[in-house]
Image (spheres, helix red, strand yellow):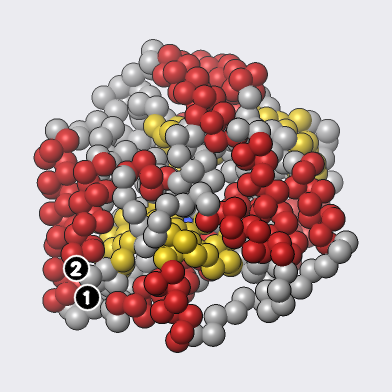
Amino acid sequence: MTSTLIDRRHATLGSHSPLFYSTPLEIVRGDGVWLDDAEGRRYLDAYNNVPHVGHCHPRVVAAIAKQAATLNLNTRYLNEHVVTYAEKLLALFDDPLDRVFLTNSGSEANELAIRIARQHTGRTGMIVSDWSYHGNTIALAELTTGLTAQEALAPHVRAVRVPDLLAEDAPGEAELVERSLAEVDRAIEELQAEGHGVCATLFDTLFTTEGLVEPPAAYVQGLVDRVRRAGGLVIADEVQPGFGRTGSHWWGYQRWGISPDFVTMGKSMGNGHPVAGVVTTSALQGEFGAANMFFNTFAGNPVSAAAAEAVLDVLVDERLRERAGETGALLRERMEEITAPYARLGPVRGVGLFFGFEIFADDGRTTPDPDTTRAIVEDMRERGVLLSRIGRHDSVFKIRPPMVTERSHAELLLDRIAESLAAQL
Ligand SMILES: Cc1ncc(COP(=O)(O)O)c(C=O)c1O
């Protein structure tokens, strides 16, 4: 039955539309941290961050159903829902971040932030990480470094290496910061010399596509300072870390002690309903609004706003951010114990409910081992747990379960990882 569905899919969506696993999974139902496949097998979902408050959370489902049965319309009419949502969302930010644009995807959010930054600065130069992903529009494809895209890096883009304190060959912190910021200085000089100037830096505040690299805070602060001194703005991509995933903060940028000009978000915002946005300052929003009639047909519609509001309410009422911190700490501690006996495994990376560790081919941890990493991802599926992999070599496990992951789920995940490592290494 599944092969027929694959054939039909290839015949319509094309064979390049990506699917997980060598034998793709057909998922038919979700509930909290659980997913059921078409054959009735149940999986612990340790991968999907879009169903942030759990698959089919009853409050989100009810909010969507109620609003869909009442009214769905665009934001050119006054409606309570979008305003209430904006108020609740903005309450999670400090001054001067006090305005929001709503969009339908993370790509649209990043694209809009860049457009506003370009108009504000009158420049185009962008600084991004050399292994990152921010979306699928032309402007974003031209700065994509961490996913296949035929577009070359645009002449106005410079990609810099984000330093990693956990890298096997990392020098001392001071040297790492100095060396990496010198690369930022060179990028800025080049952009200026070539007449692009510096428009903005755009980075994922948890450096997830990079493989959860862990830069020193002084690096992130130094990058921000340098871009600002060159007249550029700062775009914090919170599509992955946002809405409390780090446990300690609502937004990943807060861990670095910086204040961005734009915070872009998506994925988890509507628990699967397509809602995304850009939080910025009233000054930037006002300047852009005065010169552009920005309208977005679907964004901020009452059903989307009701979904997003329900997500925020659940996060607060069920203390999911705090719980992500607690469960994440437990997971990390046990994961460190489980991985310690294996010389081929790198240190546990990440924070809150987004973490992983790297597999190497050798005990000296010099050669990443994507094949074994993939084999373990497949093996974990056989053991009833879904996860994936990321990083420059696709050799770092990507574990980012829904925020409703409880201690018992964490223990199941850890037990299965321990079994899989014992079987595969
Ligand atoms: C860090 C980051 N930014 C932006 C995006 C783009 O979001 P979307 O797929 O909603 O356009 C993604 C998607 O994976 C992402 O991981």
The residue depicted at 31 percent of the width and 34 percent of the height is 367
Front residue of 209/83: it is 83
Front residue of 139/362: it is 139
N-terminal label among 1 and 2: 1
Residue 270 shown left or right of residue 194 in the figure: right
Percent position of residue 358, x then y? 39, 32
Percent position of residue 246, x then y? 47, 37
Above or below, 21 against 296 in this view is above
Amino acid on which the number 2 mark rests in the picture = Ala
* Secondary structure state at the residue bearing disc 1: loop
Q: Within 10 angstroms of label 2, few (less than 14), some, or many (20 or more) residues?
A: some
| CA separation in Å, label 1 and label 2 | 8 Å
The residue depicted at 26 percent of the width and 41 percent of the height is 217
Residue identified by numbered label 1 = 197
Residue identified by numbered label 2 = 230
Q: Within 10 angstroms of label 1, few (less than 14), some, or many (20 or more) residues?
A: many
The residue depicted at 60 percent of the width and 79 percent of the height is 295
